[in-house]
Image (cartoon, grey):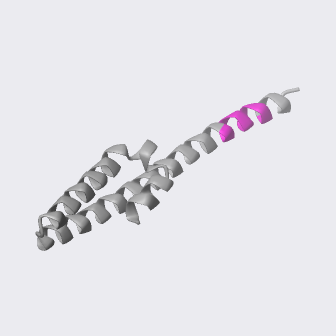
């Protein structure tokens, strides 16, 4: 569930390393469960979930940063236009 949510939040683009770490830990958790090492499987599954949540939050943060950067650029252009028009 957490990995799916992270992937849906563009973590593939904005936090690929973190998302891949989560996926790898999930694979390791499944392998541990197959070997009947349930304590290890639970630990790895929990780590995978935490890594996926981190990837999702990092992706959201990066998206917000990019939006703020674009907004600053738009404001700069608008100010230049206002300044140009005020001199006519």
Locate residue 85, reporting x and y percent.
84, 31
Closer to us: 66 or 86: 66
Horizontal side, residue 69 vs residue 13: left or right: right
Residue positioned most to the right: 88
Where is residue 25 drawn, in percent x and y?
23, 56
Say if 75 sits above or below 19 in the image: above
**Residue in view at x 45 percent, y 53 percent:** 7
Q: Is residue 54 left or right of residue 24?
A: right
Q: Magenta residues: mostly which secondary structure?
A: helix
Which quarter of the figure is the N terminus placed in? Answer: bottom left
The verdict on residue 79 being magenta is: yes
Q: Quadrant of residue 32?
A: bottom left
Image coords of residue 51 (percent x, y): 30, 59
**Residue 58 located left or right of residue 9:** left
Q: Toward which corner of the image does residue 2 lie, by quadrant?
A: bottom left
From which residue to which does the magenta span run?
A: 74-82
Does the magenta portion include 64? no
Residue positioned 67% across, 41% down in the render: 75
In the foreground, 66 or 53: 53
Nearest the viewer among 66 and 54 is 54
Residue 80: x %, y % from top left: 72, 31
Say which residue appears at 43% left-offset and 45% top-offset: 12
Q: Quadrant of the C terminus?
A: top right
Q: Residue at x 13, y 67 (%)?
A: 40
How many badges with numbers are in the image? 0
């Amino acid at each position: 569930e957490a990995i799916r949510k992270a992937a849906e939040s563009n973590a593939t683009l904005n936090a690929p390393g973190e998302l891949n770490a989560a996926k790898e830990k999930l694979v390791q958790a499944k392998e541990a469960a197959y070997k009947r090492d349930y304590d290890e499987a639970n630990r790895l599954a929990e780590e995978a979930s935490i890594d996926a949540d981190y990837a999702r939050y990092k992706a959201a943060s990066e998206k917000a940063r990019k939006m703020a950067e674009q907004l600053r650029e738009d404001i700069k252009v608008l100010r230049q236009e206002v300044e140009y028009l005020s001199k006519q």
